Every structure is written in C-alpha cells, then in structure tokens.
Image (cartoon, grey):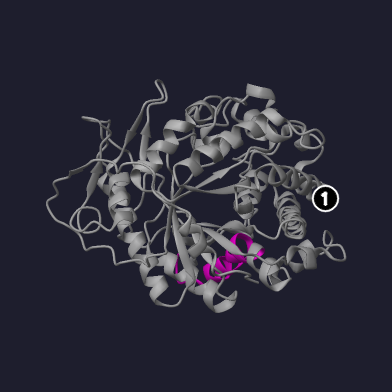
Amino acid sequence: MLRRRDFLTSALASTALAASPLPLVAMKASAQPASVPRLPPAFLWGASTSAYQIEGAVTADGRGPSIWDTFSHTPGRINDGTTGDVACDHYNLYAGDVELMARAGLQAYRFSIAWPRVMPEGTGAVNAKGLDFYDRLVDALLAQGISPFACLYHWDLPQALQDRGGWHNRDIAGWFTDYAQATVARLGDRVKSWAMLNEPSVHAIFGHGFGNHAPGLTGWASYVKAQHHQNLAQGTALRALRAAHSDLMLGTVLSLQPVLPATDRPEDAAAAARFDAAWNTINLDPLFHGRYPAAFEADFAPLVQPGDLAAIRAPLDFLGVNYYGRAHVVNAPDSFLAQASFGPLPPGTHTTAMGWPIEPQGMVEVLARLRDHYGNPLVFITENGACFDDPAPVNGVVIDPQRVEFLRAHLAAAADAIGKGCALQGYFVWSLLDNFEWAEGERRRFGVVHVDFATQKRTPKASLGFLSDVIRGKPGTGIGGAGVASMP
C-alpha cells in the first residue's frame, strides 16, 4: 500500500530553520521526570490545526457557509454559546502564527483547507480569493522553512452540499474529487503532502450518529451512509490526484484508539469488539484490505456498488494517525453505536480536562496493530495533545506542566514504537493554538500557544518551549527538564 519511504529525507533536506529560536527560561520543578528517549534524526516535528477552528473570517472574500457555521449558530448546540466566526482570526493573523512556529523550531504545519472558501457552493466555480489566502499561507510557511501538510476536509462541509444530502448523497464522492483537484491544481506546485479526510469515523459517529457535531444528524443508518460515502470519496480523490500528479505524497488521517472492555463481563467484551469495528476497522479494513468488518458487512451491503471497494482501497504514501487515548467500553443496548458506549476508566487512570484517559502506551498499541495487520504503513502522528485548565499568562508565558508531562510521556511512547519496528516518522502536536473546540466552544484549550479570544494576543506556553527543546535536542531543559517559551 505504501509507495515512497524516502520522502522524509528529501522533505527535511529542504526544511531549514529561517528564524531565531524562542528564548527559553528554565521552569523550576520539584522533580525532573525521566528524559524523552532520542528520536531519529530525520523525525519530522510539526503542529496541527483545522480551518473552522482557527481561521474566522467566515464571510470574507466570498467564503460560503459551512455546516459548522449553521450548527454553531443554532441555540443550544455549543456548550459555551460561542461560534467560529472569529475563532483565532488566523485568516488575518497567519503571518505571526507562522513566525511563532519557526521560532519554536517546528519543521511542518498540518492545516486544513476550507472547502466553502474554495467552492462556496460546494461545486462549480472556484473562488480565487479563497485560494489566495492559502497561497499566502503556503508562501509564508516556505519562506520560514516549514513544510506545509494540507488536509482537504476537516468536517466543514459547504452548507450548500448539506442541503443536497451531504455525506448521505453518493454524488459527494465526485463533488469532493472535483474540489480536491481544483485545490491541488492551485497549490500542488508548493504543497507536496496532502491528506484527504480528517477522522471520517469520528465525523460519521458524532456528526451523523450522535448528532452532537455538525450537521447534527442521528442514528445508525445515518452513520453508515456518512461512513461509506466518506470512504468512497477518499478513495476516488486519491486515485484522481495520483493520476494527475506524480510528485505528491498522498494520504489520509484516521483517529485510532485501542478498545478495551471496561469490565470483565462477556457482554462488555462483545461490545468492545463492535465498538472497535465502528471506530477503527470501519476505515482500516476497506482501505487496506478492500472489505468492511465482518460484523457490519450486511449493514453496508445495500450501499456498496460494484467497484466501490476497489476504489476505496487506494494506495497511500502515508497514514496520519490521531491518538488521544484508549476507549474503555461497556455494553449499551440503547446506544446507536453498535450497542456500545464509553464506560468507567480503570482505577487510578489520570485524565485531561475533557475527562479523556491519559494512556501513552495506547499509542504503541495502535502503531503495533498497523505494523502487524495493515502492512506497517509510513505513519505520522498527525494529532496528539491534551486539554487542561491552564492558568492565565504571567510575564509573557503560560506555565502548563500537565501538558508538558503529557507530551513527554507520549514522545517516549513514540520512541518505544519506533524501537519495536513501527514505521513512525513524525509527530504533529494538537494543537498549535487554543481554538474553537467544536461543541465545547472556546472553553476547552488544547493549544501549546494561549489565545486571548477577546484581544487575539498569543502567549506561548511552557509546552511549546518543551517541544522546542526536544526538537533542537537540548539536554537538561526540554528533554530532561521543562523549557518555557517566552516571546521577546
């Protein structure tokens, strides 16, 4: 399934730091945890964001509305009542954000492109002004020696297409492919790494099953349609782009997590197997093996037309993996999602402010599964990070020791996985900036940079200083201690 494993060497050869490092101030700590093991010299370091969560400027330069514009403006949908109308105003402030990444030593930036900015109606005419923004962003990245990694779809479907059925309409495979081809035609001379979709199973589960994400649809049948048509669109676009461009690294991004029964009851073990199929293998099996999980073949059979599974099984150059923790599952007969639901965590499990378990070893388990069952594809961790209740900035820095330790532990897990033969070649922290965190709004902060949403002031966090130290291989601060980034 994998085409070129020498990509990283050539990518890093063209990535030169073009800005001064962030000044670092030592953070006192009562104890210094174990160092992060050394990662390979060619390991790629980056940060991730998504368009609707940071760009703002939702009506600027001809952008059309997305399903998240509609959803966030519906009363009661967002926990704190905010919207992505402004978010981090990255559309206007991108240059400073790029400079900040360069000063931290980040080598790559994974961002998403807003489909409604490129094609306001979802199909047809291309909005040149919308693509102009991404031209400016890409040029700014390259000027700072940062490799752009573009994701074509991170959940912000044009509302015009939702009005035509959205991911329930089989025609969306063609609509997405047309959009992908138009975008790559404009940017592909400089952007060489492209992911098709971000977390299709999560988008299907929460946006089309539970209904607590846009577009707010519910039920098993809704989930199945959204999942199959995302898989089909992904494969169709991959094949079209592959045919038109020989110099691109093409892949996609999946959210993967080990699934364990929350108790020793047999019914919970069976629920965990169903949940694993609905979350993980619903994407992995069609992509790598050309079939849906046996548990759900009958559910998908009415949608699968001749040639679909061959189209979905499109060769990849890389797989992006988003990892946050394990799923601990119980039997739940009333749940639409394979009659399974999240259950209690093992006693003593530490959690983030989202209530998510902190389980670094689960990352090793995910990568080992890819190694053993899916051909050991070249992998980038395209999202890994944590939400904590950070303190306010003091003297130009936010001290976030919990996030520092979260990152330290997961980077150690990444090194462990590489040592066990997993083809992991890069790590993108989620997220560069505190942002609009979907249904949570602005109240949940994942960034390594603090954003004051009222003033748009950026303040680096200690976790960014830690990453900066790790990237530069500094002993005694980031790797063995905790560097704190502070802007001059």
Going 58% across and 65% down the picture, which residue do you hit?
A: 276
Q: Which residues are magenta?
A: 262-282
Going 74% across and 43% down the picture, which residue do you hit?
A: 182
Residue 413 figure quarter: bottom left
Residue 460 figure quarter: top left
Rendered location of residue 398, percent (x, y): 27, 36
Rendered location of residue 438, percent (x, y): 53, 37
Residue lying farthest right? 306
Rendered location of residue 95, percent (x, y): 46, 32
Residue 409 figure quarter: bottom left
Q: Is residue 405 visible?
A: yes
Of the pair 456 and 327, the residue shown nearer to us: 456
Q: Is residue 435 left or right of residue 340?
A: left
Rendered location of residue 136, percent (x, y): 56, 34
For badge 1, the amino acid type reads Arg
**SS at badge 1:** loop
Crowding at dot 1, Cα within 10 Å, few <14 / some 14-19 / many 20+, comes out as some
Which residue is identified by label 1? 170
For the stretch drawn in magenta, what is the main secondary structure?
helix
Going 40% across and 59% down the picture, which residue do you hit?
A: 345
Q: Quadrant of the C terminus?
A: top left
What is the total number of numbered labels drawn onto the structure image? Answer: 1
Residue 73 vertical placement versus 412 (above, below): above
Q: Is residue 444 visible?
A: no
